[in-house]
Amino acid sequence: MASVTLEKVESIWMDGKLIPWDDAKVHLLTHTLHYGLGAFEGIRAYQRADGKTAIFRLTEHINRLFDSCKICTIDVPFTREQVAQACIEVVRASKLPSAYLRPIVFLGYGALGLGSRESPVTTAVAAYKWGAYLGEEGLRRGIRAKVSSYVRGHVNSNMAKGKICGQYVNSILAKREALKSGYDEAIMLDSNGLVSEASGENLFIVRKGVIKTPPLSSAILEGITRDSMIRIARDLGLEVREETFARDELWCADEVFLTGTAAECTPVREIDDRVIGAGECGPVTRRVQDAFFDTVKGAVGKPARYPDWLTLV
């Protein structure tokens, strides 16, 4: 499942207030629609085993949203605390026990032109249902991927540390190419030919018991789920190295898995028609995956392992 059919919920938060879903509209001449300058986040809220709903690493996501806006030279007309509270309000108003949240900051209707600074800044948060991004079977068995013909942009041309609206065209083209060719996901190389990340996920490999992932100096997003997995893995006693590697090391890995808010922790069983390891979710991947879901969903009577990662709604 690479997309979601949206189902209406009661409200969307827009510029400081909750409004009906159908009233959350923008003008045809909205600046960001034409030029792509805007920033967004993807955040999950999980229903835990005790029935309570908790937003995963809300503070870190909102901080990254504001960092992305700084990269975009957009001044957000709300504080971080106000946007975080908006996320909580939207989840409550949606009445969804589990939800995907989409905060977004964009330039609205008022002026056009690449250098225009007259357009008003709009800030909004929506919540909707979204299951496993790459499918429940993908979470369990693993997915098939291909190395894309599209290259991740150089760090000085594509601001990789920001979740910037227009920059995702590169990922969309890579994803569409992969899906059209019969694969589930695209893996992208950087301008030096080294492995970068997938179209919308960070990437990890396991070789000889060691977990490796490209460093933050590479053309990759500073993933919050990536950071969570590194901490979880190290707390499990696993060695994690942040270093670059080429596609042949990717092919020869014992295990490969992808991480992201949407993808969570998804194993990769095949890349470029080459079977990875045993062609299924490997033991290291399963350990970190289980620990991740135990963290976000919990168990009745069992304290949260990383309570600072959870914001109760």
Image (cartoon, grey):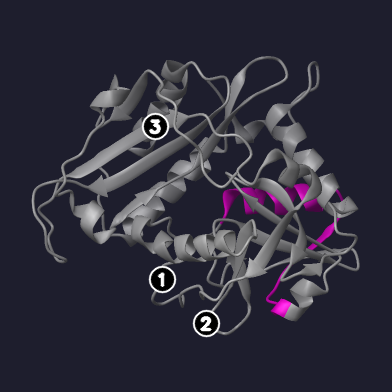
Task: Please give the residue where the numbered disc 3 appears in the rendered image.
Answer: 126
- The quadrant the N terminus occupies is top right
The amino acid sitting under disc 1 is Asn
The amino acid sitting under disc 2 is Ser
Camera-nearest residue between 195 and 299: 195
Compared across the picture, whether 131 is left or right of 3 comes to: right
Task: Please give the residue where the numbered disc 2 appears in the rendered image.
Answer: 191
**Taking the image as drawn, is residue 84 in sight?**
yes
Residue drawn at 38 percent across, 76 percent down: 157
Q: Quadrant of residue 15?
A: top left
Give the Cα separation between the discs numbered 2 and 1: 11 Å
Camera-nearest residue between 309 and 280: 280
**Taking the image as drawn, is residue 161 in sight?**
no
Query: Tag 3, which secondary structure?
Result: strand
Task: Please give the residue where the numbered disc 1 appears in the rendered image.
Answer: 158
Compared across the picture, whether 95 is left or right of 272 comes to: left
The amino acid sitting under disc 3 is Ala
Mark 3 is surrounded, within 10 Å at the Cα level, by few (under 14), some (14 to 19) or many (20 or more) other residues, namely: many
Image location (x, y in percent) of residue 38:
31, 53
Give the Cα separation between the discs numbered 3 and 2: 35 Å
In the image, residue 206 sits, relative to residue 12, either above or below, namely: below
**In the image, residue 55 lies in the stretch drawn in magenta:** no
Image location (x, y in percent) of residue 170:
44, 66
Magenta part of the chain:
223-247
Labelled pair 3, 2 in contact (Cβ < 8 Å): no
